[in-house]
Amino acid sequence: MESLDAVSSEIIGAIAIADSLDVLEAIRIDALGKKGRISLMMRELGGMNAEDRRVAGQTLNKVKDDIANAIAAKQKILAAAVLNERLEAERLDVSLPSRPETDARLHPLSRTIEEVIAIFGEMGFQVAEGPDIESDYYNFTALNIPPEHPARQEHDTFYLPVDAEGRRKVLRTHTSPVQIRTMESNDPPIRIIVPGRTYRSDHDATHSPMFHQCEGLVIGDGIHMGHLKGCLIDFCRAFFGVDDLPVRFRPSYFPFTEPSAEVDIGCTRQNGALKIGAGDDWLEILGSGMVNPRVLENCGYDPEKYQGFAFGMGIERIAMLKYGIPDLRTFYDSDLRWMRHYGFLPFDAPSIHAGLSGGGV
């Protein structure tokens, strides 16, 4: 057996000058591994007599422990050096400016819906909602739409497969079914607006298979056409921000109102540009009328006692007019460049509560 003092001094000396964890691991294996120098000496104890084995064993165990302790201590020093070197190499300059963040934008549709709700909210209207999938009764029949009306045809309306009862539901073509549901479950007076998604089989620069409408309904005792005109004139002037905006009511036809009227606003067209306000031209923006007595009867109301008016507008259409957006399809393109141009910063947009002149219902 080699001299233990010489072996211990040699190994501990090598540990002291080790300059990396890899070198230290090699020293550990050479000394304490299965075929290491100390391990081989431990095997030689089997050939000694009992007394010599006892003495040599104690000495070997002490040398083994000293080497293991020296390795552990050196390992901590070298690991700390590696960590410090890594921290030095990965140091960040916290004085550098942070990466610029992209400001979020409010979609023009969301903004327009908020504006419409705020304006009518100041007139005392409440928001009502209903399902996107409707029965034929609520979407057509209860609204006095005859069986031969073009809106009931396959080329205009999205029909769902036949259900277990042999009936076909539809994706609602307008938000008017919510008016019926509201009248069925509430007694007058009623004053609601119904913003929501609607669906029609059409797609071009001014039409989309899915689009948004906002309809309004007022039912009460003594409601007349003057109330309708005052309400919509105030809305148009508040929404477009033009105090003296000309508003014209033109006779029209809708199955669910009688009499019915298209609502036009004044504008000027020059060099391909459209300007909302007093001018030499008119632009149609929404439909309206007094609720047809048949619709009131379908909902259980006495048309001799209660009257009302209704109106409806396309959210995309009025947004396009107000914000100068030329193509409806771009509302749904998810183009961030378009959003940065037409979108609104949530806290920097002008107040949506200004502009009401009074005089509504």
Image (cartoon, rainbow, N blue to C red):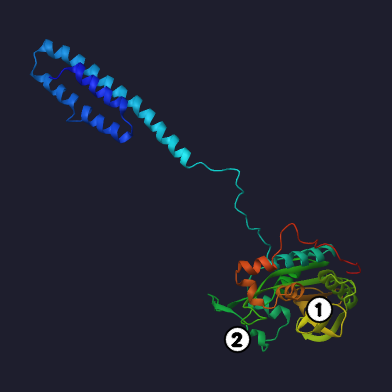
Give 189 or 338, whichever is nearer the viewer.
Answer: 338
Residue reaching furthest to the bottom: 148
Which x, y percent locates residue 231?
A: 86, 72
Q: Is residue 345 left or right of residue 258?
A: left
Q: Is residue 267 left or right of residue 90?
A: right
The part of the image, by quadrant, that contains residue 211 is: bottom right
> What residue is shown with label 1?
275
Q: Residue at x 21, y 16 (%)?
A: 5
Residue reaching furthest to the top: 51
Residue 288 seen: no
Is the residue marked by circle 1 packed among few (<14), some (14-19), or many (20+) residues within 10 Å? some
Locate the C terminus by quadrant: bottom right
Mark 2 and mark 1: span between their CA atoms? 35 Å
Which x, y percent locates residue 329?
A: 63, 76
Secondary structure beneath label 1: strand
Q: Is residue 16 left or right of residue 58?
A: right
Locate the N terminus by quadrant: top left
**Badge number at residue 155:** 2
Q: Is residue 28 above or below residue 313?
A: above
Residue type at tag 1: Lys
Which x, y percent locates residue 95?
A: 61, 43
